[in-house]
Image (cartoon, rainbow, N blue to C red):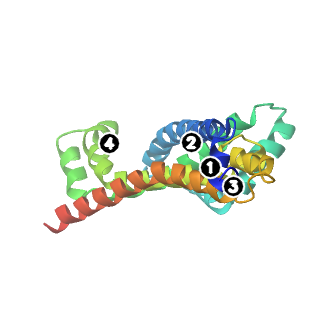
């Protein structure tokens, strides 16, 4: 058992390094989600305005981030734009920016869909009592849209967390990159260590994403029960 594959996790600082990589993953995803969700809410509200030009521009913004693969997006933000614009930021910050803009695009569509799903009579009632546009959104539309958009928002959060697995391609020391280094450094002494290292990474991602996924499904089920009840 001296060279059992599972021992690779406890060799030196390997396990601590994996948790350090996980923290980097969570930090990048967390910052990107906070910025992206806030910007996405604002853009989603704007997409419901009657201004056709504004709606067209925001639609193109959404389609850009939907069409471009995440890997290409990271390369664009890390390798191409810094050289063209003379910006020199660490890989972690560029990853946060790329993920935040992608999140905001996806969130804008969730918010737009939730807002237009609010029953028409709610909007008409607000206008009947003299609410202006901003008051209508603040007191009537947005509060009701929150419950509609929450399951989709949680699913978006899990997608962002899972997609951080591509960060190793721009040399970010996330949990995947650290895991790969651990495997390569210990491959001779622990040939089957790769199974345990990536098994631990799977457990880490599962521990974060599964509760969120379960929560989203539960919220969606409750919403459907209320709608049918």
Per the model, the C-alpha gap separating discs 4 and 1 is 33 Å
Q: Residues within 10 Å of mark 3 (few under 14, many from 20)?
A: many
Question: Looking at the image, which residue is at 69% across and 48% down?
Answer: 179
Q: How crowded is mark 4: few (under 14 residues within 10 Å), some or many (20 or more)?
A: some
Q: Where is residue 222 in the image (x, y as percent from the top left)?
A: 23, 59
Report the residue marked by disc 1: 164
Report the residue marked by disc 3: 193
Question: Looking at the image, which residue is at 31% across and 55% down?
Answer: 148
Counting residues from the start of the chain, the first of labels 4 and 2 encountered is: 2
Report the residue marked by disc 4: 137
Per the model, the C-alpha gap separating discs 4 and 3 is 55 Å
Mark drawn on residue 29: 2
Question: Looking at the image, which residue is at 36% across and 57% down?
Answer: 214
Disc 4 vs disc 2: which is toward the camera? 2
Per the model, the C-alpha gap separating discs 4 and 2 is 29 Å
Nearer the observer, 26 or 199: 199
Counting residues from the start of the chain, the first of labels 2 and 1 encountered is: 2
Q: Do the residues labelled 3 and 2 touch (CB within 8 Å)?
A: no
């Amino acid at each position: 058992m001296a060279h059992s594959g599972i021992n690779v996790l406890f060799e030196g600082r390997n396990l601590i390094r994996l948790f350090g990589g996980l923290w980097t993953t969570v930090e990048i995803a967390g910052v990107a989600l906070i910025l992206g969700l806030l910007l996405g809410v604002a853009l989603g509200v704007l997409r419901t305005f009657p201004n056709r030009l504004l709606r067209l521009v925001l639609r193109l913004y959404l389609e850009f981030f939907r069409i471009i693969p995440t890997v290409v997006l990271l390369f664009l933000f890390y390798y191409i734009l810094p050289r063209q614009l003379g910006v020199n930021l660490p890989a972690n910050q560029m990853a946060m920016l790329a993920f935040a803009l992608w999140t905001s695009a996806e969130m804008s569509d969730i918010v737009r869909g939730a807002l237009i799903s609010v029953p028409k009579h709610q909007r008409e009632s607000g206008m009947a009592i003299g609410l202006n546009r901003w008051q209508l959104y603040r007191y009537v539309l947005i509060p009701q849209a929150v419950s509609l958009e929450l399951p989709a928002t949680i699913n978006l959060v899990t997608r962002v967390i899972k997609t951080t697995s591509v960060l190793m391609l721009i040399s970010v020391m996330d949990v995947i990159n650290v895991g790969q280094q651990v495997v390569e450094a210990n491959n001779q002494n622990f040939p089957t260590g790769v199974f345990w290292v990536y098994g631990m990474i799977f457990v880490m991602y599962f521990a974060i994403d599964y509760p969120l996924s379960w929560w989203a499904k539960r919220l969606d089920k409750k919403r459907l029960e209320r709608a049918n009840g």
